[in-house]
Amino acid sequence: MVSASLAVVLLAAVVGMGVAALVWLHRDRPGAGPLAAFVVAASLWAVAHGLELAVPGVVLMERLLQIQLTLSVVIPVAWLVTVLEYTGHPHWLTRRRVALLLVEPAVFVTLVWSNAAHRLVWRGGSVVTSAETSTLVPVWGLTRWGHLAYMLVLILAGGALLIRTMLRTTDRFQGQVLALLAAITVPTVGHSVHALDLVPARFDPTSLGYVVSGVVLSGALLRGQLLDVAPVTRDLGQEAVFTEMDDAVVIVDEAGRIVDVNDAATALFSADPAALSGRELAAELPDLAETVPEAGERAQTETRLEHDGAVRYYDVRITPLYRSYGVVSGHLVSLRDVTDRRQREQRIDVLNRLLRHDIRNEMNVVRGNADLLADSVDPAERDRIDRIVRTVDGIVDRSNKIGRVSEALERERAEPVRLPELLGTVVAEARNRYPRADVTLDCPDACWVDGSPALSLAFEELLDNAVEHSDGAPNVDIAVSVRNEGVVVRVSDDGPGIADHERDVILAGEETPLQHGSGVGLWLVKWVVRNVGGTLSFVDGPGTTVEIELPAATGPSTVDDRSAGEPPRDGSTATDSVTDDSAADGSPTV
């Protein structure tokens, strides 16, 4: 009957081959190929050792020992290659380095199979028999100890690389790294203990170590965590982002020395990028170095850098870099070139000043002179003077309108706005300006939106457009409804409608030389609505219908307002909606 020790060793071989099959199914993953070779070699090693326990005769045992020693050279090399691929360093495996790695295994295997001629691997041995098993106990030579040392060096090198990766990665990948470390540590320790004869044993416990390895690897594979997602993928992605991003990025250590720069940042430095590593940032770019805060602090600022006689402006964001246990290892300095944006802002400021002040003042001069000429020109030319005055008034009106909206957008703050009150004021003012217009408002009492006082300017502009572009007595209806989590305000009129190209320009959000609007009114409406988080759209149909959807808000918990739910003092009752209609004589009513 086969002994328990032989059964355990053969079980190690079976489990190892099963693990090898699972790993081979994932051979497209980083490190799967050499890991499969590792597990196959380990399993065959276990098979050879199991046969050594069962066969009689010293000669046959020596042949099986030679097979085991030959398979042992695969383990450390396959392990190191697995780790290099898994951690994203396959480029290290150049042909020259691979050849150097294989020199010792090739020499050792040659000496193993020619040992009878020189006795450098083992000098002899004895057969130890126990129950139904027997094993060969060799007397090892110097070459065997050298090979064992070489195995340990390669395994420790891979372990050190894994530990480095574990300290720099996330919790998920740390579990993967621990699985790999455990898978190699157990059999290596067992092999070393047996080789040094630290624990007396009648058979090599390395096979038992690989049983444990197989269990660890199988568990990792069945959970889908070992090879499905490897840190190399994340590292390669981060490296690609760092290298190819348009923003300049400089990495400095805690002492302010340059660690790395991406391609976009190389233009900032006069020195060769390859020579920047280790140099002081303060010596290369002193203005940028002044923006770097104390270790562990974040910062966002703007700076100007001069290079090759040109001055560029940058938005600088500085993020601390942490190692394990919260230790700060440096800072990541990201620079976004905002020179063009800064120049555009300057041009806009100048144009805004010209439109809001200079042109308006000059148009007032033109209008004043036109009024003076009106009394002295021939009556037949009076129409020309009136046209000049109307044109000037239109330019001044647009300037005032843009100025009001710009000032409102610059100083506004988002706040809950009670829509019935805001719209009621806008409607009342519109009736005062246009007595011939029939303006109605239908809005629920308890209706609040996230907005700002600038909304009144947007609705005022819509009413002005509806009235001014109407041929006769205009009818304008404002209807408010609650839809999902928003409030929809629909402004409808019976005018000629808005041309399709005007709608397209507003909805597209940009004007082109071939497609542009005729005014700024709808642009101002869109800017105000978008600024408070709303949307603007047009509804097909007769006349013009503009639909504005605003985010709903919750009003104050207590509102000292009759329309907010408090009964009127005259004894009347508040209704669920407010409807404003013009009186029969045209006077405004609210």
Image (spheres, helix red, strand yellow):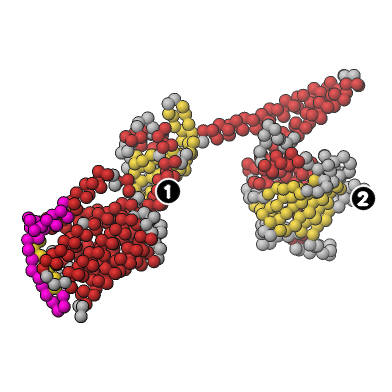
Residue 83: x, y in percent?
30, 54
Span colored in magenta: 107-133
Judge whether residue 234 is colored magenta: no
Residue 519: x, y in percent?
74, 36
| Horizontal relation, residue 374 to residue 215: left or right | right
Q: What residue type is labelled 2?
A: Ala
**Which numbered dot is residue 584?**
2
Q: Which amino acid does label 1 sit on?
A: Gly
Residue at image mark 1: 237
Can residue 234 be seen by looking at this rendering?
Answer: yes
Q: Which of 242 and 536 is in front in this view?
A: 242
- Position of residue 200 relative to residue 486, above or below, is below
Residue 56: x, y in percent?
13, 72
Marked residue nearer the N-terminal end (1 or 2): 1
How packed mark 1 is, by other alpha carbons closer than 10 Å (few <14, some 14-19, many 20 or more), is few
Q: Which of 263 and 56 is in front in this view?
A: 56
What residue is rendered at 55% in x and 35% in y? 341
